[in-house]
Amino acid sequence: MPNLMTSLALSVIWVAGGLLVGALARWAGWAGGMLGAQGGRGRTAALIVGACGALAGGWGGTLLLGRFYGSPSAAWVAVVVVTMLPRLPWPLRRAGA
């Protein structure tokens, strides 16, 4: 049971860190073109993308590198995803939106 609680606690910490990264990107003005959304949806998308990126990075880092490197990889992946995703030209962006 301690492993389950540790995993849950780490997941909550990673999501909170991802929300913080998304909020910083939103505050810096990088979230305007997130996923082709404009206005409030783009800013909310930055929070969601930051949280999902941190969670994926944390679990990926834990599985690939070990439990001691899960949190640094969560922070790294969240920052890279939130800063690079709005700048990528790909089909999720709509031409007229």
Image: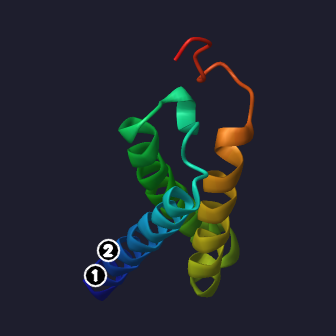
Q: Amino acid at mark 1?
A: Met
Q: Residue at x 48, y 50 (%)?
A: 46
Q: Position of residue 78 (x, y in %)?
A: 59, 62
Q: Would you name the residue on which mark 1 appears?
A: 5
Q: Residue at x 34, y 73 (%)?
A: 12
Q: Is residue 35 above or below residue 31?
A: above
Q: Would you name the residue on which mark 2 appears?
A: 8
Quadrant in the rendering for residue 53:
bottom right
Question: In this view of the protein, which residue sits in the foreground, 20 or 33?
Answer: 33
Q: Going by the picture, which residue comes out furthest to the left?
A: 1
Q: Amino acid at mark 2?
A: Leu
Q: Position of residue 95 (x, y in %)?
A: 62, 13
Q: Position of residue 26 (x, y in %)?
A: 50, 57
Q: Residue at x 33, y 80 (%)?
A: 9
Question: In this view of the protein, which residue sits in the foreground, 34 or 58?
Answer: 34
Q: Quadrant of the N terminus?
A: bottom left
Q: Position of residue 17 (x, y in %)?
A: 46, 73
Residues at discs 1 and 2 in contact (Cβ within 8 Å): yes
Quadrant in the rendering for residue 79:
bottom right
Tag 1 secondary structure: helix
> In the image, 67: left or right of 83?
left
Label 1 vs label 2: CA separation? 5 Å
